Image (cartoon, grey):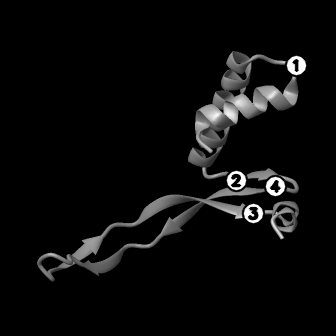
Amino acid sequence: MNKAELIEKLAEKSKACSKAEAGRSLEALLEIITETLKKGEEVVIAGFGTFQVKEKKARMGINPKTKEKIQIPAKKVPRFKPGKGLKDALK
């Protein structure tokens, strides 16, 4: 499912809003989650899951083309941990 399909389903399910309103709501939700993660905080949606930021340490790697050792810098990556409700729904 892509973003356009998600907006369409959201508008269908809610029955109280148009596709345009559903699109704005989805954009707002994604923006809020992104801003919260940028602050280093996590977003917990009970029964669905947790969005959090994980810090990866700097490490040594190998360039597969030249076999030369390279330093890979530390970075922050987003992570989603599914909640019990979502896990149970998929069984």
Say whether residue 17 is visible.
yes
Query: Mark 2, residues whose alpha carbon is within 10 Å: few (<14), some, or many (≥20)?
Result: some
Marks 1, 4: nearer the viewer: 1
Residue 33, above or below 52: above
State which tag comes first along the sequence, 3 or 4.
4
Q: Measure the C-alpha gap from mark 3 to mark 2.
A: 13 Å
- Left or right, 31 with reference to 13: left
Q: Could you tell me how far apart the alpha carbons at marks 1 and 4 are, in whole angstroms?
A: 23 Å
Q: Which residue, given by chain and number where applicable, does mark 4 sit on? A: 48
Packing grade of label 3 (10 A; few <14, some 14-19, many >=20) is some
Report whether residue 31 is seen: no
| Residue nearer the viewer, 62 or 54 | 62
Rendering quarter of residue 30:
top right
Q: N-terminal of the two: label 3 or label 2?
A: 2
Looking at the rendered structure, the kind of residue marked 2 is: Glu
x, y percentage for residue 46? 87, 54
Q: CA distance from mark 3 to mark 4?
A: 6 Å
Specify the label residue 51 is tagged with: none
Q: Residues within 10 Å of mark 1 (few under 14, many from 20)?
A: few
Q: Are marks 3 and 4 in contact (CB under 8 Å)?
A: yes
